[in-house]
Image (cartoon, rainbow, N blue to C red):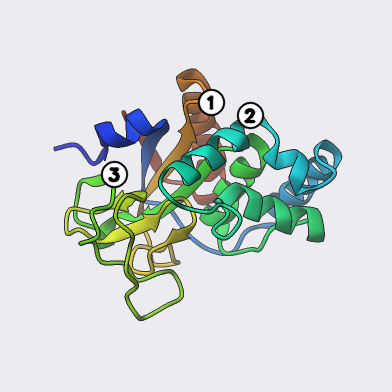
Amino acid sequence: MSLFEVSDDCLRLGLRATAVVFRDVTIGPANAGLQADIEAAAAQARGRYADLKELIATPELTRLYELFRSVGVNPKKHPPSIPNLYRYALKRGCLPSINNFVDAYNLISLRTLFSLGAHDLATMSLPVTLQLFDGSETFVPLGSEEPQPVTAGEFGYVDADNRVICRLDVVQGEFSKVTAASKEVLLIVESTDAMSAERQQQVAGEAIGLIQACCGGTAERID
């Protein structure tokens, strides 16, 4: 059985995603070295883009915004994860610190414009699938205890029990969040057809190297 799948509908839409399984990781606060690297990347981001308008005008973000609109989502009202990270970085010169695993993949996102997200493997029923919602899925957003409806036609990640682990690449699910208790983690690296498959695999490799340096453990790519 595959652990991770991308539906044909999402491929035709223009989405691309690959996954990595990390085992025996140690989750805790980010160390000073990782925090310094994040601050350096934030400074570089300020040098590359004067404001969010310049970021959104890049081919990578232009294509992602097109995909959002094609499934009926207003990206100004529900901005993707990358503009949210950059907004924080441009304003504050850093990123919010969650833990060493999350902070590490957020740094990779800041450097590459790829959307990365992680989920506690032990909490989910497999496989995880990137698919278009039909409206029957259950979704409890991160930080909430109450379920919210999902809109048919939107895309997102769902486990085998029809639970949403991430709506679009905007809001993750509460039940699968990565915490200090997580030992096995599924990392998803998402892009669009504006990025090459080779570049996506390269970014996945960068994420593996940084996360293992910060959290230890082993890593297995899921193609």
Q: Which of marks 1 and 3 precedes in the sequence?
A: 3
How far, Cα to Cα, is label 3 from label 2?
24 Å
How far, Cα to Cα, is label 2 from label 1?
7 Å
How far, Cα to Cα, is label 3 from label 1?
19 Å
User: Which of these two is toward me, 116 or 16?
Assistant: 16
Percent position (x, y) of residue 191? 49, 35
Mark 2 lies on residue: 59
Mark 3 lies on residue: 131
Percent position (x, y) of residue 195? 53, 25
Q: Which of marks 2 and 3 precedes in the sequence?
A: 2
Mark 1 lies on residue: 194
Q: Could you classify mark 1 by the number of other residues whose Cα lies within 10 Å: few (under 14), some (14-19), or many (20 or more)?
A: some
Asked if the residue at tag 1 contacts the one at tag 2, i.e. Cβ–Cβ closer than 8 Å, the answer is: yes
Report the residue at 45% width, 39% height from top. Answer: 189
Label 3: element kind: strand
Q: Which of marks 1 and 2 precedes in the sequence?
A: 2
Mark 3: which amino acid? Gln
- Residue 183 seen anywhere in this rendered image of the structure: no
Q: Quarter of the image containing the N terminus?
A: top left
Mark 1: which amino acid? Ala
Label 1: element kind: loop
Asked if the residue at tag 2 contacts the one at tag 3, i.e. Cβ–Cβ closer than 8 Å, the answer is: no
Report the residue at 62% width, 59% height from top. Answer: 30
Mark 2: which amino acid? Pro
Percent position (x, y) of residue 47? 86, 39
- Residue 151 seen anywhere in this rendered image of the structure: yes
